[in-house]
Amino acid sequence: MYGTKIKAIRMARGMTQDELAAKIHVAPNTYCKMEQDQRKNWDEDLLQKIAAALDVTISDIVSPTPIIMSFHDSPNSVVGNQTITISKEVLDILQKQLEQKDAMIMELLKKISG
């Protein structure tokens, strides 16, 4: 449900799965399952821990809209006018998010138009 977006944010922050798992106090294999969307229940406490560790809001995670963020090693560094290289994997994840959003919009439009 939120795993794809969390993974994209984590990668943009330059964190490994193990690092984020440690920050939110879950086992690495449990965290891996979260990114693979094998988790059914996302309680607010868990989402808050993930959001805090990634320096984003819960809304950034649960919103169907991709978030705009800087892709760099540290969430606290200033990017400015510097050229940023984004890995193909991150671009693929963001593309998937956009495709999912587009599909949701098309589905809603079909329901509205009857």
Image (cartoon, grey):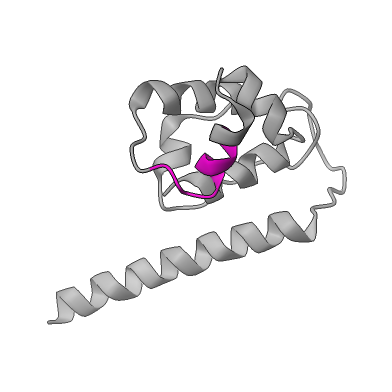
**Chain part drawn in magenta:** 31-39
Q: Nearer the viewer, residue 90 or 77?
A: 90
Q: How many marks?
A: 0
Give x and y (percent) for residue 7.
Answer: 61, 44
Rendering quarter of residue 101: bottom left
The answer to whether residue 33 is magenta is yes
* On screen, residue 12 above or below 64: above
Residue at 41% x, 36% y is 59
Q: Nearer the viewer, residue 108 or 11?
A: 11
Give left or right: position of 76 versus 49.
right
The answer to whether residue 32 is magenta is yes
Residue at 52% x, 64% y is 98
Q: Nearer the viewer, residue 22 or 61?
A: 22
Give x and y (percent) for residue 20.
Answer: 65, 27
Give x and y (percent) for residue 34.
Answer: 51, 40
Rendering quarter of residue 25: top right
Q: Nearer the viewer, residue 50 or 85?
A: 50
